[in-house]
Image (tube, helix red, strand yellow):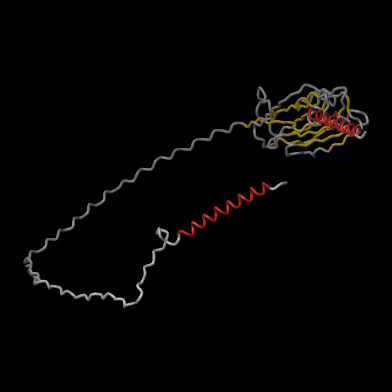
Amino acid sequence: MKTIPRMLALAATALAMVAILALAGVWLFRGGNLASANPVGDVAMDLDVSGNSANQEGNSDPCLSKSAGDKFEVDVLMSTLSPEETLGSFDYSLSFDDTRLKINTQNHLMLLNLQEGSVVSDTSEAVPDVTSPHHVTVTDHAAPETNVQGVLGRYQVEVLADAPPGLTSLSLADVVLRDGTGSPLSVMNVLSAFVAVGVPCPTPLPSTPSFTPLPSPSPSASPTPSPSPSPTLSPSPSPVPMPTLTPSPGPAPTLELVPSPTPETGPSPIPTPTPTAPTPTPTPAPGAARPVALPATGAGSASGSSWPWWSLAVAGAVAGAAAVLLAYQGSRAKPN
């Protein structure tokens, strides 16, 4: 009877694990945030704001040519929110080249403020903002928008007076749109725009945000210095020969030969022999015992006294082995 409850507990544990794995798979498949299955079409930068409104998109322009000191407006657009979805908040970072541009003003009471009763809080970075990127966070706490498209935010951008000429970009990063419950919405495309400072917009435009400075003027070649004339070397004076000294003649020296002494020779002396006395041989007294010579001892002698010891050792070892063998056989022969 105890087996059935145990099997039921194991089955319940297995089902719980399967459910957890299924939820984890859905979470990973949706990009780790359980994003909506109906994505927003695009979030894009638009440099032509003339046809745009809070809930309408006009003709977009991805590039403008501006001069130093010019001011212009830029819109961030959202398109194609499906009827099944709502928009409750958005976050993004607006990146710009802060050596050429700055953001003067911002307006986020656009698309997110359409619904009657909306309560919008804006915790974006303050303007003017002269340091890139510009962080934006806006939330509607009361009435999320439904079935809309249009302008998320509008910004006034100014070209700095000392901006160097070239092509620079306005781009979006870390774009997050959430519905009325706080769940993220999927975004298909995030599009950038370009500002040509002091130069025309190129055709075609780069596919990614870029910064293209004008080519620097070629440095003028430095004049080649004229070679200095080589100094003329004066010849060194020839050495004055020294006079040769000639010795005056004189009388030649006379050498006197001294004869070496001749050693005297004589007859060699004859050595005188020294007589040697004979050694007397002792004669034993009559009746005394004659000494007997002892035999030599050692391992090398066949008649030495060392051979009995090793033979006795070998015999003892053989006897001990025999005794051990007999004792073993006797113990086996005893009855159990």
- The image shows residue 252, relative to residue 205, as above or below, that is below
Residue at the extreme front: 287
Q: Is residue 236 left or right of residue 94?
A: left
Q: Is residue 110 left or right of residue 71?
A: right
Q: Nearer the viewer, residue 17 or 3?
A: 3
Question: Which residue: 18% across, 57% down?
Answer: 242
- The image shows residue 214, relative to residue 234, as above or below, that is above
Rendered location of residue 317, percent (x, y): 55, 54
- Quarter of the rendering containing residue 289: bottom left
Rendered location of residue 224, percent (x, y): 44, 38
Rendered location of residue 144, percent (x, y): 89, 29
Q: Quadrant of the N terminus?
A: top right
Task: Count how many numbered circles sit on residues in the image.
Answer: 0
Question: Which residue: 68% across, 31% down?
Answer: 168
Q: Nearer the viewer, residue 140 or 273?
A: 273
Q: Nearer the viewer, residue 276 or 333?
A: 333
- Quarter of the rendering containing residue 62: top right
Rendered location of residue 286, percent (x, y): 31, 77
